[in-house]
Structure formats: C-alpha cells, structure tokens
Image (cartoon, rainbow, N blue to C red):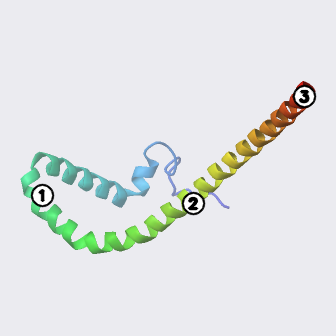
Amino acid sequence: MAWDRRRRRGSGTGPLAFVANNLALVVCTVIALVVLVIARAQEPLFESTREALNDATAPMMEMLAVPGAEVRRWGEGFSSFFSVYEENQRLREENARLLAAQRDFAALQRKVQ
C-alpha cells in the first residue's frame, strides 16, 4: 500500500485513538452517566418513569423467563445426574466392601461351628 502524505502520522494509534474514532459512543456514554447521576440524586423525579417502564416490560420479561426457567431446570437435571452417578459409584464400593465383610463373617462363623 502506498504512503498517503495527507494522513497524519500516528493518528490511528495511541490511547485517544479509540475515543477519536468512536465519538458517538463516547457521547452516548457520557449522556448515560449523566442520566444515572441525576436519577440517583433526584429519585422521585424518575420514580414514575421507572414504574411505567416496569409495567410496560413486565409481560415481555415474564415471557423471557419461561425459557430461562427451562434452561435452569435442565441444568439442575444434569447436575443431579452427575451427583446420582457419583452416589451410585460410592454405593457400589460400599456394597463390595460389605460383601467382602460378609464373606469374612461367614468364614469366621464356619470356623466357630
């Protein structure tokens, strides 16, 4: 690629290059921070707006909660599967240990008789 003499050296690099290239993002971030500070300082001013937004978005949030509950239920099923598998392994080991003890007990009982 040929060198463009009109391009300033280092304009696309450096710590402020991101800010310079994304000015709209910076402006939106500053506006959002100002609104957050005002909302914290003047809570009664934003309370009615917050209530209206909660009322308007409640049905959508309930609709989105259904798949979330299903995913959570499936996750609990997978975790219970692994815990049941581990408990099954532990019970098999305990069963083998008890069978060995029972054989030893039967051998000692035959010896006593």
Lateral position of residue 48 relative to residue 63, left or right: left
Q: Residues within 10 Å of mark 3 (few under 14, many from 20)?
A: few
Q: Residue furthest left?
A: 44
Task: Tell me the SS state at disc 1.
Answer: helix
Q: Residues within 10 Å of mark 2 (few under 14, many from 20)?
A: few
Task: Tell me the SS state at disc 3.
Answer: loop
Tell me if residue 71 comes above or below residue 56 in the rendering. Answer: above
Lateral position of residue 108 relative to residue 50, left or right: right
Tell me if residue 53 comes above or below residue 97 in the rendering. Answer: below
Type of amino acid under label 2: Gly
Q: Residue furthest front?
A: 113
Residue 9 locus on image (x, y percent): 53, 48
78, 85: nearer the viewer: 85
Name the residue: 15% across, 52% down.
39
Lateral position of residue 18 relative to residue 23, left or right: right
Q: CA distance from mark 3 to mark 1?
A: 89 Å
Q: Of tags 2 and 3, which is closer to the observer?
A: 3
Q: Indicate which disc residue 77 carries.
A: 2
Q: CA distance from mark 1 to mark 2?
A: 42 Å
**Residue position marked by numbered label 3 in the rendering:** 113
**Residue position marked by numbered label 1 in the rendering:** 46
Q: CA distance from mark 2 to mark 3?
A: 52 Å
Name the residue: 11% across, 51% down.
43
Tell me if residue 109 comes above or below residue 95 in the rendering. Answer: above
